[in-house]
Image (tube, rainbow, N blue to C red):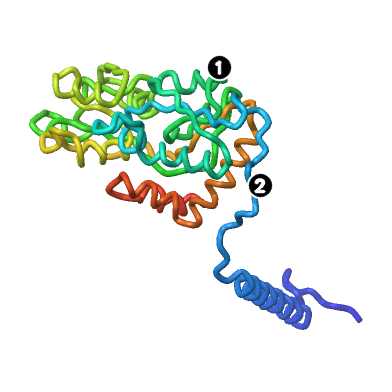
Amino acid sequence: MTTILRTGLLAPALLCAAMTQSAFAQDAASDAAAAFEAAIGDAQPVKNYPSPWPLRNLLKEGVLTVGTTGTSPPRTFVDPATSELTGSYVELFEKLAEDLGLDIEFVQLEWAGILPGLAAKRFDLACDGASWNPERLGSDQFLMTSPTGLNATVGIALKDGDISSFDEIGDGVIGGVRGEIYFEGAKKALPEADTTDFPGLQESLLGLQNGQANVVVMNLSNALSVLDSAPNKDDLMMVGPALEVFPQSLCVNATEPDLLVAVNTLLGNYRADGSLSELIGKYATSTAEVDLLGKIGY
């Protein structure tokens, strides 16, 4: 039998058959999806991983060595009442170590030394939320985990100053923590501004108070913490709009890809069971940085 094609279209009988087959395929796919969803139901995150996890290249056997600044509240800071290192990411590192069956040892240093320290193999794990960029994601000096949160580049200024938005900076002075991606990105975004750098967040806020900078650039999480808990918070204001938005993650020693797999597995569970959001919410005024990860597929 000959099928006649006219004006580039399928003959009616063939077109009808094709449409029927397409509808059948859609129905089958829908039925399969419904059956899969019914079978999975309220299943919890998969936790049938080894405990302790066999990790072959740790710097110290049985110990997770972690680099952190201790100067970036609410993620990592020294509690003035106890002189103990604490914060949401300090607790996250401790939870990872516990679930990996490891003891934990913190090495505290300035942010500018964190990534070089990883490259020099001083830590197994580090970064209190390192923002993604092409250089970091493509680096052979360290590995980056799946995201732990979203963050953005904003600023803090004095309410009685002359700056209320980044558009008003002009040739004013922007300050920031030496080596931080937010500060480096702000320099590129605001090329006419003068710049001054500081070793840490607290020093940058002191510099703002002393008139060394008109605006101090930092990530949104730190800015919200400053506006909530700084002694002079009533004198401060946030400066925007955000210059950049970043996924952020932890950083892993480049010689330890097995640790990267282990940490990514655990972080996936923490995102799914809500424990990551709970840790962030324990120290921060909002859990949006975790809750919004779904917007980028996590």
Amino acid type at image mark 2: Pro
Q: Which residue is located at x 16 percent, y 35 percent?
A: 164
Q: Position of residue 205 (x, y in %)?
A: 21, 26
Q: Which residue is located at x 29 percent, y 18 percent?
A: 198
Q: Quick one: which residue is furthest to the right in this view?
A: 1
State the residue position of label 2: 50
Q: Which residue is located at x 41 percent, y 43 percent?
A: 150
Q: Is residue 214 above or below residue 52?
A: above
Does residue 166 appear in this view? no
Q: How many marks?
A: 2
> From the image, which quarter does the N terminus lie in?
bottom right
Q: Give neighbour class at mark 2: few <14, some 14-19, many 20+ (Cα, 10 Å).
A: few
Q: Position of residue 195 (x, y in %)?
A: 27, 17
Q: Is residue 258 above or below residue 294?
A: above
Amino acid type at image mark 1: Ala
State the residue position of label 1: 120
Mark pair 1, 2: CA separation? 29 Å
- The quadrant in which residue 193 appears is top left
Q: Position of residue 269 (x, y in %)?
A: 54, 52
Frontmost residue, 176 versus 83: 83
Frontmost residue, 201 versus 236: 201
- The quadrant in which residue 242 appears is top left
Residue 283 located left or right of residue 250: left
